[in-house]
Image (cartoon, rainbow, N blue to C red):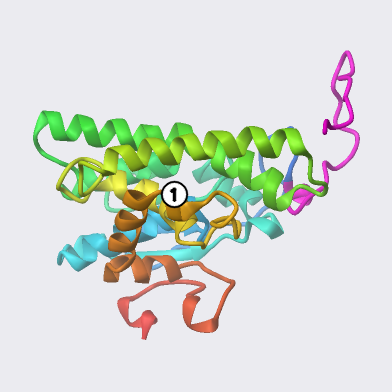
Amino acid sequence: MTDKAYIPPKVWQWDCESGGKFANINRPISGATFQKDRPIGEHPLQLYSLATPNGVKVNILLEELLALGIKAAEYDAFLINIGEGDQFSSGFVEANPNSKIPVLVDHSVNPPQRVFESGAILLYLAEKFSAFIPEGLAQKTECMSWLFWQMGSAPYLGGGFGHFYAYAPEKYEYPINRFTMEIKRQLDVLDKHLANNTYMAGEEYSIADIAIWPWYGVLVLGGLYDAAEFIEAHTYKNVNRWAKQIAERDAVKRGKKVNRTWGEPEEQLHERHNATDFK
């Protein structure tokens, strides 16, 4: 079975919405669409995000840092509803010209430092607090390799497989087959690596695990795109072992809730300004 052939025009023009769940916020231009300042809480670290896989990464790391007793990692997390276009406010675009969540602004330095792109935020915080990043050159290099693996691989999972399997207005065989094949290949890469390693960088839990888990760990545990059965997630036994091990961490459980607006009420914490917000 083949999909109906599409003949691209000589010059592509944006003349209608593309359809699908996020059609109302997709556009071929950047920049702010309305004026609104960013709110600022009482802590030096200000996070503006939503509990998507990319957003959850930073939530988890901040909660892990606090669990270590690093009080300087206290943070305010403000909700950015990407479905409503909050990411196109002038205040948000000032912090992230790419209009994507998450974005962090560190007010402990002068002038305040903006950090955008989830991988960059993880690296910034890990280096700032000397935690969850290996010290030895070999282990640190391994950690960085897997961190950047995630940054390069996850778009195939999210914008590729996730879009065509879960969000596209129509289901087409070719893109679903193409991206399913790639996601299964990626899971096989992880499974073979985790057969000989407790965590991504060896025996030490690191930002590489924190980056990869909200995408691939949640996928095999059945929490992403409702696709676990479709991709035969149970066959990736080492990924499942690793995913379950991380899911049991208290900081991970807290981080999953921050800026979450769906699911059961007890799974949601729309904004986070203090540890007591979880109670």
Residue 174 horizontal/vertical position (percent): 74, 33
Find disc 1 in the rendering and name its residue. 216
The residue that appears at 33% across and 37% down in the rendered structure is 147
Main SS category, magenta section: loop
Decide if residue 265 is on the left or right side of residue 209.
right
Residue 106 visible here: no
| Type of amino acid under label 1 | Tyr
Taking depth in this image into account, of 76 and 16 the one nearest to the observer is: 16
Asked if the magenta segment contains residue 11, the reply would be yes
Taking depth in this image into account, of 230 and 15 the one nearest to the observer is: 230
SS state under label 1: helix
Residue 220 horizontal/vertical position (percent): 46, 55
The residue that appears at 52% across and 42% down in the rendered structure is 96
Decide if residue 10 is on the left or right side of residue 199.
right
Asked if the magenta segment contains residue 136, the reply would be no
The residue that appears at 38% across and 80% down in the rendered structure is 277
Decide if residue 147 is on the left or right side of residue 50.
left
Residue 232 visible here: yes
Q: Which residues are magenta?
A: 1-25
Residue 55 horizontal/vertical position (percent): 47, 54
Q: Which quadrant, please, contains the N terminus?
A: top right
Residue 47 horizontal/vertical position (percent): 42, 57
Q: Which quadrant, please, contains the C terminus?
A: bottom left
Q: How many marks?
A: 1
Residue at the limit of the structure toward the bottom, as seen here? 279
